[in-house]
């Protein structure tokens, strides 16, 4: 409760690693927005703080209402701190640290296959090598059956991708075209467990659906380009029913696993969107990758975070899968199932209330963000990120390039009078 005349403050914590550009934009736009929201009879203001890592008593009381986290998937102290503040203190965290830790790419494949979404034929392959601790050697020598990798390759078909079952960032991903190249890739694959997955062939578009709560953005992606050019500015990358399917796929995956901020890679072929990679704990959010799409990402993140903070959204810790399975088992068309899954997903993310909240309180956000993304201060943010990644002689060129892409976004998304 706030005292009369004094607004109640919601504190948003940023749990960050190497991220540089989006936090600066996020902080500045929230500052410029100078927002006060009337919520259930109280005036609510918003503050941001970057979270530092320190020892904590398991009974201490955190001060944050919402935390945007970028460390859970690899930084144990922060992950366990997030579990504590979520479980004991009801802090809302993007993303749910438990499901991120326990659900890897493999789980996301099997779960979405269970829901009937189009996932390519995929096999799990035991690793090529094992550590030499005693129990492992005993287990492997007693129970690992010799297998014929070539036979599995024939069943999956070529080309195919050998990739870590819990991978990310293209690490350890090999495209194989025949039995010889499969054996060669497997022989180099070390101790990691891998999938062999049939390649989606003849695709004409790779789309990344980036989900942020109930919102989904569709970004065009071209894996054949050098890093700075992989995201391709294309506001109409998918349209109509196809755009809806891509959005629904992404939202359903995220609601199913209790992830707020996650991306889903889809390849369009044979009139379908094939899902190949959708357990991405910490989607690429750098201006040097996203450029044209960067403002949309920051704006969506602001909208969802402000909403969660304002209404004190409660963490939803446990997945609830049975309602999805009940729909999967009905005799319905794929689209009708997707529509019903999506209804569950929207319910999970409180989509109607979120939209109403944005219409009532955040109608000024676009104009504030639009102005910010045209400033010299923002150009300096771009420069800082470019300088962190590119050689000195390329900093000017790439700063201009990425800033220009963002000006293109501004011209495509003008502020309405
Ligand atoms: N089944 C597939 N069909 C076609 N291309 C694929 C397939 N699996 C992976 N790829 C290609 O390899 C890249 C990396 O694989 P991905 O599963 O996305 O791994 P990561 O999680 O490391 O990003 C994809 O972006 C895509 O270009
Ligand atoms: Mg990927």
Image: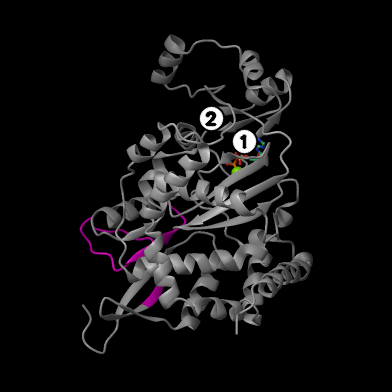
User: In this picture, is 1 found above or below 16?
Assistant: below
Pointer 1 with pointer 2, Cβ within 8 A:
yes
Residue behind mark 2? 192
> In the rendering, at what x and y percent does residue 168 appear?
56, 43
Q: Which residue occupies 24% across, 59% down?
A: 89
Residue placed most toward the observer, 351 or 232: 351
Residue 279 x, y percent position in the rendering = 50, 43
Q: How crowded is mark 1: few (under 14 residues within 10 Å), some or many (20 or more)?
A: some
Element under label 1?
loop
User: In the rendering, at what x and y percent does residue 340 appear?
Assistant: 43, 45
Label 2 neighbourhood size at 10 Å, few (<14), some (14-19), many (20+)? some
Q: What stretch is highlighted in magenta?
A: 46-73
The quadrant of the picture showing ligand 2 is top right
Q: Is mark 1 within 8 Å of ligand 1?
A: yes
Residue identified by numbered label 1: 172
Residue at (47%, 69%) from the top-left corner? Answer: 302
Q: In the drawing, does residue 410 fall left or right of residue 249?
A: right
Give whichever of 321, 285 is nearer the camera. Answer: 321
Q: Look at the image and say whether residue 383 sits in the magenta stretch.
A: no
At x 44%, y 71%, the residue is: 358
Q: Residue 142 vs residue 276: left or right? A: left
Screen quadrant of the C terminus:
bottom right
As displayed, is residue 345 above or below residue 401? above
State which tag comes first along the sequence, 1 or 2. 1
Quarter of the rendering containing residue 1: bottom left
What kind of element bears circle 2? loop
Q: Nearer the viewer, residue 408 or 242?
A: 242
Spot the residue most to the bottom. 5
Asked if one can make out residue 49 in the rendered structure from this viewpoint, the answer is no
The reply to whether the magenta stretch includes residue 72 is: yes
């Amino acid at each position: 409760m706030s005292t009369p005349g004094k607004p109640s403050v919601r504190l948003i914590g940023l749990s960050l690693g190497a991220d540089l550009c989006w936090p600066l934009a996020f902080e500045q736009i929230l500052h410029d927005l100078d927002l006060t929201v009337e919520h259930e009879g109280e005036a609510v203001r918003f503050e941001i703080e970057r979270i530092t890592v320190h020892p904590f008593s398991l009974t201490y009381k955190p001060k944050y209402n919402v935390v945007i986290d970028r460390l859970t998937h690899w930084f144990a102290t922060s992950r366990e701190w997030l579990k504590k503040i979520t479980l004991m203190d009801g802090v809302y965290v993007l993303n749910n640290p438990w499901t991120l830790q326990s659900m890897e790419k493999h789980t996301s494949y099997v779960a979405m296959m269970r829901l009937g979404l189009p996932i390519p034929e995929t096999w799990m392959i035991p690793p090529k090598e094992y550590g030499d601790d005693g129990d492992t050697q005993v287990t492997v020598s007693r129970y690992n059956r010799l297998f014929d990798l070539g036979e599995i390759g024939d069943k999956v078909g070529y080309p195919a991708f050998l990739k870590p079952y819990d991978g990310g960032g293209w690490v350890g991903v090999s495209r194989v075209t025949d039995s010889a190249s499969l054996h060669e890739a497997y022989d180099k694959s070390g101790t990691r467990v891998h999938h062999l997955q049939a390649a989606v062939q003849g695709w004409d578009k790779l789309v990344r659906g980036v989900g942020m709560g109930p919102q989904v953005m569709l970004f065009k992606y071209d894996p054949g380009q050098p890093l700075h050019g992989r995201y391709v500015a294309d506001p109409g990358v998918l349209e109509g029913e196809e755009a809806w399917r891509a959005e629904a796929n992404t939202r359903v995956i995220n609601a199913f696993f209790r992830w707020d901020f996650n991306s889903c890679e889809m390849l369009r072929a044979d009139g379908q969107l094939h899902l190949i990679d959708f357990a991405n704990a910490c989607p690429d959010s750098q201006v040097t990758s996203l450029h044209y799409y960067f403002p949309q990402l920051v704006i969506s993140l602001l909208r969802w975070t402000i909403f969660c903070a304002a209404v004190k959204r409660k963490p939803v810790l446990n997945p609830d899968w049975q309602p999805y399975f009940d729909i999967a088992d009905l005799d319905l068309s794929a689209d009708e199932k997707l529509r019903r899954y999506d209804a569950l997903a929207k319910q999970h993310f409180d989509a109607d209330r979120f939209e109403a909240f944005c219409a009532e309180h955040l109608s000024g956000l676009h104009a504030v963000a639009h102005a910010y993304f045209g400033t010299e201060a923002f150009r300096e943010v771009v420069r800082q990120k470019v300088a962190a990644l590119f050689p000195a002689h390329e900093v000017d060129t790439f700063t201009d390039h990425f800033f220009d892409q963002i000006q293109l976004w501004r011209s495509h998304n003008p502020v309405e009078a």
